[in-house]
Image (cartoon, helix red, strand yellow):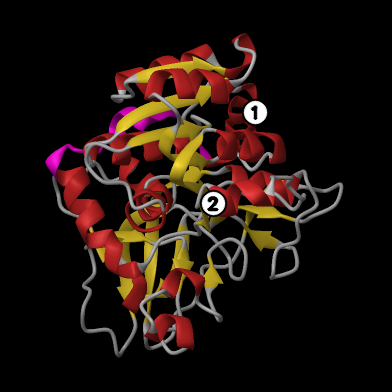
């Protein structure tokens, strides 16, 4: 089969013919319909972040497809079934899984990180983790539910605890950030979207953001947010992974409010601890999505409350994966998908 293989170092990505994955008794083989192109992969390719499985490895963790073959002990899935593959596969046995916090599973497996991923024609995964996709949801665009929509769903619903009427400022209007805008608007929030890209800010408005702020055109985003909200947002969410924007998001939060950090950075941030105490500000992190949240999320997509088709702005062939990353870095896409 064809796959894009990451070799690390100076070799980078290469399109290759590789053996078809084999499956065990509890696994399925999925014919990939599409795989979303995520900024996480750039951390591996360009920023030196190591994958758990040493290269060569097939990247790609945001996939949908059709079941090609089922293992001998698989009872819940059949050949020809349309499925979504979550980005993170959980053990179901560790303390965190037993607590209902499978998204921080101590023995998690991530596609395109721990095991070969879905920048390929076929991928093998445990049957217990995949989800049925209704016929009404477009199969290729559904791939982005696996991360670009599920990650902000968990952040908005469970970690930021957004409620109807809450004011929420979202820093970063890329794929995950725009997912946060969509989920928050569908949850009844008053959303303020922040970015430096006017096209993305227009998309945020199109998806229901009440206000937008171009951070490059104002003195301080926090000042603008306080003007719009009468003293500060109920919740601020940073979806970029930039220390400076995390700090600015913190400054946007009202007394008694909440900061939710979704973007990844290995760098330190600097905030005044006294403000956390004196203003009773909550600071929470958010990682991935719990398995139990996928079904209600899929229902939101099915009902039209979340629009995956409009969020996919570009589509590429597998051989064009590097072009998909180039479009991402140029800031002209929301979410791109690649199709084998």
Name the one closer to the observer, 279 or 210.
279
Query: Mark 1: few, some, or many residues within 10 Å (few <14, many ≥20)?
Result: few
208 with respect to 147 (left or right): left
Find numbered disc 2 in the image and state the secondary structure of the residue it sits on. loop
Residue 315 point in image, percent of width and height: 44, 31
Location of residue 216 (image quadrant): top right
Disc assigned to residue 329: 1
Range of residues picked out in magenta: 303-317
Residue 68 appears in view:
yes
Q: Residue drawn 62% across and 40% down? A: 246
294 with respect to 119 (left or right): left
- Examine the rendered structure and indicate whether residue 229 appears above or below residue 140: above
Residue extending farthest right? 10
Q: Residue drawn 43% across and 85% down? A: 24
Q: Which residue is mark 2?
A: 119
- Magenta span has 306? yes
Residue 338 appears in view:
no
250 with respect to 286 (left or right): right
Residue 8 point in image, percent of width and height: 79, 55
Location of residue 283 (image quadrant): bottom right
Q: CA distance from mark 2 to mark 1?
A: 19 Å
Q: Residue drawn 53% across and 31% down? A: 172
Q: Earlier in the sequence, mark 2 or mark 1?
A: 2
- Examine the rendered structure and indicate whether residue 298 appears above or below residue 240: below
């Amino acid at each position: 089969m064809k796959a894009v293989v990451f070799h690390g170092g100076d070799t980078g990505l290469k399109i290759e013919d590789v053996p078809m994955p084999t499956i065990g008794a509890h696994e399925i083989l999925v014919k990939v319909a599409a795989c979303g192109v995520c900024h996480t992969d750039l951390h591996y390719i360009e920023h030196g972040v190591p994958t758990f499985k040493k290269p060569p490895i097939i990247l790609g963790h945001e996939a949908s497809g059709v079941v090609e073959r089922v293992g001998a002990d698989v009872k819940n899935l059949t050949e020809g079934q349309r499925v979504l593959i979550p980005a993170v596969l959980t053990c179901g046995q560790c303390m965190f899984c037993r607590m209902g916090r499978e998204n921080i599973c101590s023995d998690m497996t991530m596609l395109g990180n721990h095991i070969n991923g879905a920048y390929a024609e076929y991928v093998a995964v445990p049957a217990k983790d995949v989800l049925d996709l209704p016929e009404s949801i477009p199969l290729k665009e559904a791939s982005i539910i696996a991360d670009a929509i599920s990650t902000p769903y968990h952040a908005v619903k469970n970690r930021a605890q957004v409620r109807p009427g809450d004011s929420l400022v979202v820093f970063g209007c890329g794929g995950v950030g725009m997912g946060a805008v969509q989920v928050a608007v569908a949850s009844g929030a008053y959303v303020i979207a922040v970015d430096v890209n006017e096209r993305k800010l227009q998309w945020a408005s199109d998806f229901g953001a009440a206000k937008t702020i171009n951070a490059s055109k104002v003195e301080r985003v926090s000042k603008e947010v306080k003007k719009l909200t009468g003293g500060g947002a109920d919740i601020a969410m940073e979806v970029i992974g930039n220390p400076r924007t995390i700090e600015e998001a913190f400054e946007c939060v009202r007394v008694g409010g909440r900061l939710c950090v979704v973007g990844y950075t290995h760098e330190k941030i600097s905030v005044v601890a006294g403000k956390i105490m004196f203003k009773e500000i909550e600071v929470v992190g958010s990682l991935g999505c719990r398995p139990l949240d996928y079904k209600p999320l899929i229902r939101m997509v099915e009902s039209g409350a979340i629009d995956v088709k409009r969020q996919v702005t570009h589509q590429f062939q597998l051989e064009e994966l590097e072009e998909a990353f180039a479009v991402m870095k140029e800031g002209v896409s929301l979410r791109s998908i690649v199709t084998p």
